[in-house]
Amino acid sequence: MEKLLFIDACISTHASRTKRLCTTYIDLFLKKNPEVTLETVVLRKGKVEPLTKERIIERDNYIKKKDWNQPMFDLAKQFQEADYIVVGTPYWDLSFASILKVYVENIMVADLTFAATNTGFVGLCEGKSLVYITTAGGFIGDKNFGYDYMCGVADMFGIPETELIKAEALDIEGFDAEKIMEKTIGEVKQRF
């Protein structure tokens, strides 16, 4: 059975507009693909932690032995086995919430999610596509470094397709945030 993995980095101090777009996309995807199961990982402190010197040494020892049964590889194995990936995160500081970078550090595992060769990286993930969903209070323009970064991650992991869904200018005076959200939701619905 195929799996859709939702990486929920929809950190917000209010009702998350990013989560609203993610929910719309995921609901429509699952309705169109009822045979696909959903797995969700909510990124928060305690679920994912930055790599420390000690954890890197421990991790490197396990990698040398290819001991993938260690709990520190659970997120990487989950990502590696996913057929479809949806990443939801607000547009912060020209990219995304920092917890997403910590997550990527945890899933970037040599010989599990990618292999290094003398000609470059080879992806070892089963993913067919990665959809990146974000919302921004202002205009993103050509500074969507978060999406660009996740495209690089997808390429390194062997995921052939990436797609961006965004709603921007949501907090600019004179712009109707709800109309922008409804327009973006309409665009998401047209994909299905």
Image (cartoon, grey):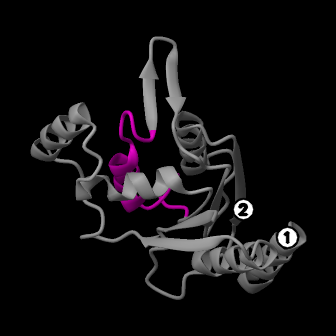
Based on the picture, tell me whether residue 108 belongs to the magenta stretch: yes
Q: Position of residue 73 (x, y in %)?
A: 31, 52
Q: Circle 1 sits in a helix, a strand or a loop, which is it?
A: helix
**Disc 2 to disc 1: CB gap under 8 Å:** yes
Which residue, as the protein is rendered here, is positioned at the far top?
118
Q: Which residue is mark 2?
A: 165
Residue 48 seen in render: yes
- The vertical placement of 51 against 131, above or below, is above
* Circle 2 residues within 10 Å: few <14, some 14–19, many ≥20: some
Q: Which residue does the image show at 44% across and 28% down from the upper left? A: 115
Q: Position of residue 124 (x, y in %)?
A: 51, 37
Q: Which residue does the image show at 20% across and 40% down from the upper left? A: 62
Say which quadrant the N terminus sits in.
Answer: bottom right
Query: In the picture, residue 19 is in which quadrant?
Result: bottom right
Q: Position of residue 153 (x, y in %)?
A: 52, 41
Q: Which residue is mark 1?
A: 187
Which residue, as the protein is rendered here, is positioned at the far right?
190
Q: Amino acid at mark 1?
A: Glu
Give the magenta part as a residue range: 91-113
- The vertical placement of 36 against 146, above or below, is below
* Circle 1 residues within 10 Å: few <14, some 14–19, many ≥20: few
